[in-house]
Image (cartoon, rainbow, N blue to C red):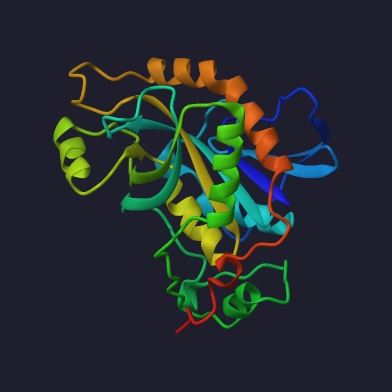
Amino acid sequence: MLGVIGGSGLYKIEGLKLIDEVELNTPWGKPSDKYIITEYKGNKIIFLPRHGRGHLYPPHLINYRANIWGFRKLEVNKILSVSAVGGINENYKPGDFVISYQFLDFTKTRASTFFEGIYTKEDDYIKDDLVSQYLKDKRVVHIDVSDPFCPELRNSLENSLKKLGFSYHKNGVYVATEGPRLETAAEIKALKTIGADIVGMTLVPEIVLARELGMHFASVSVVTNLAAGIKGEKLTSEEVIEMMERKTEEIKKLILDFSENLPTNFKCDCQSSLEGAAI
């Protein structure tokens, strides 16, 4: 089943049938909002507003563990992350879509694992898998994130973007910063030298937590503006909101086409991410 985490209005799509809204609790607290269960051409898609409806939670205070665990409880095994980013690579223009294939983590205060040794919490939701076993045994886990994104989902995203004729870049390096402040021009200059293409505040720890649960995870971002110091102009939230509103219909079309063309047999190693990772 596919989960989509992003803006609060993404589920309002013509042809998408609203089935239910589910409120969950988890050992890590409450998710950002209710999970919106929908159906499109016989396939279920579950949406979660990352910041809550009304944009209640800043990036550094989102309950990422609760959000991702809630998807697990709803039997989601594939996640599409949709986000707004600033452009660092000079070839990336406002309005372009970006499929990330690597990330750089410059966050500071966020819990980024479910497995905390003797401090690990358990849930009454138990599956016959390594996740439940390692939580029960209070194991410490070090997952491999050499190739963090699901190659199968990345390929499906590219096929959909190509089919729809949207401008995109397929090998983006996403740098995650703590926020909620924007970056300085010096920070962006430094991040560019180490290979960053886009900058945002939400991908990490979402992707790390999803990988710990053996989920297939892909990220598509919209470049809403150029990052600090590139144009030499003041950055505002208004330009981010305006660009995302302009791109909303394209994002919705992308989600529907992507959901129709997901692979049935995954040949990646996402589901085995926990194998050999526990101490």
Residue 262 lies, in percent from the top left, at 69, 49
Seen at 46% across and 75% down, the residue is 141
Seen at 51% across and 50% down, the residue is 64
Above-or-below relation of 153 to 180: below
In this view of the protein, which residue sits in the foreground, 114 or 192?
A: 192
- Total marks shown come to 0
Seen at 43% across and 58% down, the residue is 111
In this view of the protein, which residue sits in the foreground, 27 or 188?
A: 188
Residue 130 lies, in percent from the top left, at 62, 77
Q: Quadrant of residue 148?
A: bottom left
Above-or-below relation of 30 to 212: above
Is 28 left, or right, of 243 in this rendering? right
Seen at 35% across and 35% down, the residue is 180
Is 215 left, or right, of 234 in this rendering? right
Residue 209 lies, in percent from the top left, at 51, 59
Q: Quadrant of residue 43?
A: top right
In this view of the protein, which residue sits in the foreground, 13 or 69?
A: 13
Above-or-below relation of 227 to 155: above
Residue 13 lies, in percent from the top left, at 72, 25
